[in-house]
Amino acid sequence: MKADVHAPASAVALSCGEPVIRVEDLKTYFFTRDGVVRAVDGVSYHVMAGETLGVVGESGCGKSMTALSILGLVPKPAGRIVGGRVLLDGRDLVHASEAEMQALRGNEISMIFQEPMTSLNPVLTIGQQIAEALMLHQKLPKRAAMARAREMLELVRIPDSARRVHEYPHQFSGGMRQRAMIAMALACNPRVLLADEPTTALDVTIQAQILELMLELQEKTGTAIIFITHDLGVIAETARRVVVMYAGRKVEEASVAALFETPLHPYTVGLLRSVPSLEPDSDDGRRRRLTEIPGMVPSLLDIPPGCRFAPRCPFATEECVAAEPPLTEHRPGQWAACWHTDRVEATFDA
């Protein structure tokens, strides 16, 4: 399977120095009556200025919880970060105070949530909600903040912004609400944007417009984007690198081109083969049948021994059950946690 990898480099050149944000061996656990849920269990990745990093995996793999951990929004008291670091320009956010995190959220780090109707306040106008962040973080007076809110609505291509800025979320369509969320997230020109499934509930036409808009705004601002999704087609259109997560851990990381052309982890292969394709897969010109990944993501209360994917893996051997494979760099820039990458590669190429 080939990716349509045309996501351009940002007009702001990718930094040759330190990443804007770096997640190092992050561990976020939930302490429940039934036991310890290892929602994020040793995840590491980084993003440069102007770069989009895709984070993919099934529901329950820890993608969104990693993002909430970055923002310091882990549900308490059950959940807490028990290890690792989150470095924003060298500052460790894990040990930052709540006051410091409040100053960062919406200002230096912003997040676009999956469901705008549950994220937008129904009793405040769209303009008031955008202006609120500007008054808090940029110290703008109310009139200037509302003017900036109108500008942001124009930037995300919401027509008649002078009128729309005074309307409420229920008066916006789904696509317009998502554009408003993007306007709110980008109002303070954040260094990092966390986009958690921002196009899942939208039809394909609106989805394409939202993706194009995000990349266009990134070109102008140089924002580092962490794009969380289960849709590999979206990743092919937007990201430069991809992190694949499974059961709270990172199992593969590669450039978009390498991941689509030569995946090295069987879970990645399963994800790719479950994506609809228009390309013929046989001599008679018939399209390739979709292949589902058998089984389910394991309960994070009862993680299987060895490789976490072994119970669902067609390549699994006794070695896979005996010991968890380390995340190893098999090619420059391509890492995978699998004992049988050679067999996986040979099977995918075939």
Image (cartoon, rainbow, N blue to C red):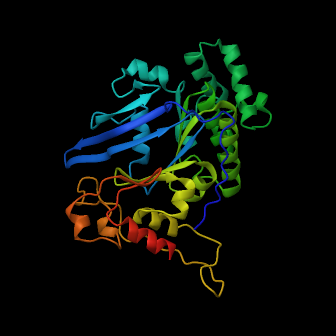
Query: Quick check: can you spot residue 93?
Result: yes
Task: Answer with left or right where residue 246 lies relative to residue 290.
Answer: left
Q: Decide which of 309, 125 is in the foreground and name it.
A: 309
Q: Decide which of 129, 272 is in the foreground and name it.
A: 272
| 292 vs 219: above or below | below
Task: Answer with left or right where residue 327 lies relative to residue 163.
Answer: left
Q: Which quadrant of the view contains residue 101?
A: top left
Residue at the limit of the structure toward the front, as seen here: 332
Q: How many marks?
A: 0
> What residue do we see at 39% from left, 27% from top?
93
| 285 vs 9: above or below | below
> What residue do we see at 53% from left, 25% from top?
108
Quadrant position of the N terminus in the picture: bottom right
Q: Position of residue 100 (x, y in %)?
A: 42, 19
Q: Position of residue 98 (x, y in %)?
A: 38, 21
Q: Position of residue 254 (x, y in %)?
A: 49, 52
> What residue do we see at 63% from left, 42% from top?
178
| 65 vs 188: above or below | below
Query: Quick check: can you spot residue 292?
Result: no
| 305 vs 316: above or below | above
Task: Answer with left or right where residue 124 lies relative to residue 320.
Answer: right
Q: Which quadrant of the view contains residue 121?
A: top right
Q: Decide which of 67, 146 is in the foreground and name it.
A: 67
